[in-house]
Image (cartoon, helix red, strand yellow):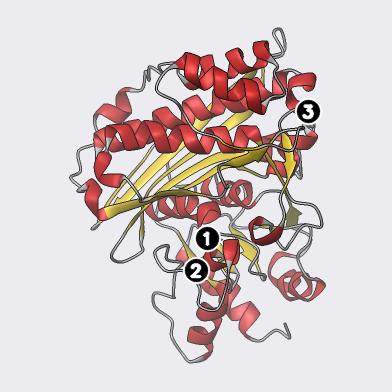
């Protein structure tokens, strides 16, 4: 497990550097954007974009982790299709080639024959990442990799990544939008039970150096398996005056329902993964979402970290049914191994019943009690 955890953290660090690199030069960045269509499109957005950065990061993680752990072959999946169309209308398959030179040649075709950009990205893709984190070496937990599968969200909150706003002021510690919400999410789950086991969240745009104007990142991890819980973070305390974080598109009915519990302490932010991270860091007691607009790749990594810290993430619709039926114990949590029936494309992996991410069980119970009697 220590080796797998280090592999995922290392892949997230390389991914963060690629994300940072792709944002540094606007001319380069404009080559990288493509609009999603059809089954790949998130129904929440009128326009849904992917970037070559998304696709490169996903393929780098699949390549690097799969090379080290061949037993995971075929079980490392992500949000993005690995096909990308250049300005000539050519559809090319993005992949990590055997050599840096071969990867640069492929990127040269994708990037409209921009040789400097292709070579810069290829160098980032083939770089060796050296982790200097003694805490990772102390993780002693035996989980056979052949029991696991992995969900990747290469850049969660892609729309905010594209907009590139660097100086959005936080409200109560939570940034409502901007680059801070663009995260790399890598989560492993048990293939049999679907339970999240291991999560890594990388914040590529955690802090901008005031002198070099280059971005500095941060990462967080958690492991929750068979009663053992480990994390790079400490559990935040229960707040006497809790706040909740919501999507800016959350329904008026849900906002009204939560007002008695939170008053004026409702916060709004972009990015599902970022809102989950706000709960993990104790900036909010809960993230409540009434719609099925998040996916397994959004929630798997944060869910694993929440479980490692004593929290969790429930299926809102199923949890409300259980609560109204009198259940007060463990409420139905999200799982990650089964596609939704009767759906196609990305919707097969949607968290269709909405969700509540929480750190403290007593606060989850407060949310359930409030929503169970509300007119939603």
Indicate the position of residue 32 as horizontal and vertical percent values.
71, 31
Q: Residue at x 47, y 69 (%)?
A: 339
Q: Nearer the viewer, residue 90 or 18?
A: 90
Residue 324 in sight: yes
Quadrant position of residue 370: bottom right
Label 2: which secondary element: strand
Q: Residue at x 77, y 57 (%)?
A: 45
Q: Nearer the viewer, residue 208 or 129?
A: 129
Identify whether 202 is placed above or below 256. Answer: above
Give the residue number, with chain letter if any, for mark 3.
30
Gap in angstroms between the C-alphas marked 3 and 2: 38 Å
Q: Which residue is drawn at 50% across and 22% down?
A: 125
Q: Which residue is drawn at 66% across and 10% down?
A: 116
Give the residue number, with chain letter if any, for mark 1.
358
- Left or right: residue 138 versus residue 77 is left
> Which quarter of the rendered picture does the N terminus lie within?
top left
Please give the label number shown on residue 314. Answer: 2
Crowdedness near tag 2: few (<14), some (14–19) or many (≥20) residues, C-alpha within 10 Å: many
Label 1: which secondary element: strand
- Tell which tag, 1 or 2, sits nearer the viewer: 2
Gap in angstroms between the C-alphas marked 1 and 2: 8 Å
Between discs 3 and 2, the one toward the N terminus: 3
Residue 173 in sight: no
Please give the label number shown on residue 339. Answer: none
Identify whether 75 is placed above or below 132. Answer: below
Indicate the position of residue 261 as horizontal and vertical percent values.
68, 70
Between discs 3 and 1, the one toward the N terminus: 3
Q: Do the residues labelled 1 and 2 touch (CB within 8 Å)?
A: yes
Q: Do the residues labelled 3 and 2 touch (CB within 8 Å)?
A: no
Indicate the position of residue 46 as horizontal and vertical percent values.
81, 57
Quadrant position of residue 86: top right
Between discs 1 and 2, the one toward the N terminus: 2
């Amino acid at each position: 497990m220590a080796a797998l955890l280090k592999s995922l953290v290392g892949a997230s660090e390389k991914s963060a550097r690629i994300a940072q690199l792709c944002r540094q030069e606007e001319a380069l960045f404009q080559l990288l954007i493509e609009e999603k269509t059809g089954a790949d499109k998130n129904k929440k957005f009128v326009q849904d974009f992917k970037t070559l950065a998304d696709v490169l990061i996903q393929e780098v993680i699949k390549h690097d982790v799969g090379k080290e752990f061949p037993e995971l072959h075929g079980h490392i999946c992500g949000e993005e299709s690995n096909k990308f169309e250049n300005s000539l209308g050519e559809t090319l398959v993005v992949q990590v080639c055997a050599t840096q030179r071969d990867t640069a040649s492929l990127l040269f075709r994708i990037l409209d024959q921009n040789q400097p950009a292709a070579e810069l990205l290829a160098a980032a893709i083939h770089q060796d990442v050296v982790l200097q984190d003694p805490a990772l070496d102390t993780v002693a937990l035996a989980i056979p990799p052949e029991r696991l599968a992995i969900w990747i969200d290469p850049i969660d909150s892609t729309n905010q990544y594209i907009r590139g706003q660097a100086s959005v002021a936080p409200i109560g510690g939570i940034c409502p939008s901007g680059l801070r919400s663009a995260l790399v999410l890598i989560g492993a789950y048990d293939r049999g039970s679907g339970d999240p086991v291991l999560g890594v969240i990388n914040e590529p745009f955690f802090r901008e150096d005031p002198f070099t104007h280059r971005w500095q990142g941060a990462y967080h991890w958690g492991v929750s398996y068979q009663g053992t819980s480990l994390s790079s973070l400490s559990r935040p305390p229960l707040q006497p005056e809790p706040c909740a974080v919501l999507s800016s598109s959350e329904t008026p009915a849900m906002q009204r329902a939560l007002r008695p519990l939170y008053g004026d302490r409702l916060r709004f932010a972009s990015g599902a993964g970022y809102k989950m991270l706000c709960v993990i860091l104790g900036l909010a007691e809960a993230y409540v979402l009434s719609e099925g607009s998040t996916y397994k790749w959004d929630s798997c990594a944060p869910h694993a970290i929440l479980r490692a810290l004593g929290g969790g993430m429930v299926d809102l619709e199923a949890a409300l049914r259980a609560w109204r039926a009198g259940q007060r114990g463990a409420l139905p949590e999200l799982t990650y191994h089964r596609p939704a029936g009767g759906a196609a494309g990305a919707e097969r992996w949607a968290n269709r019943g909405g969700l509540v991410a929480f750190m403290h069980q007593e606060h989850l119970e407060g949310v359930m009690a409030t929503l169970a009697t509300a007119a939603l």
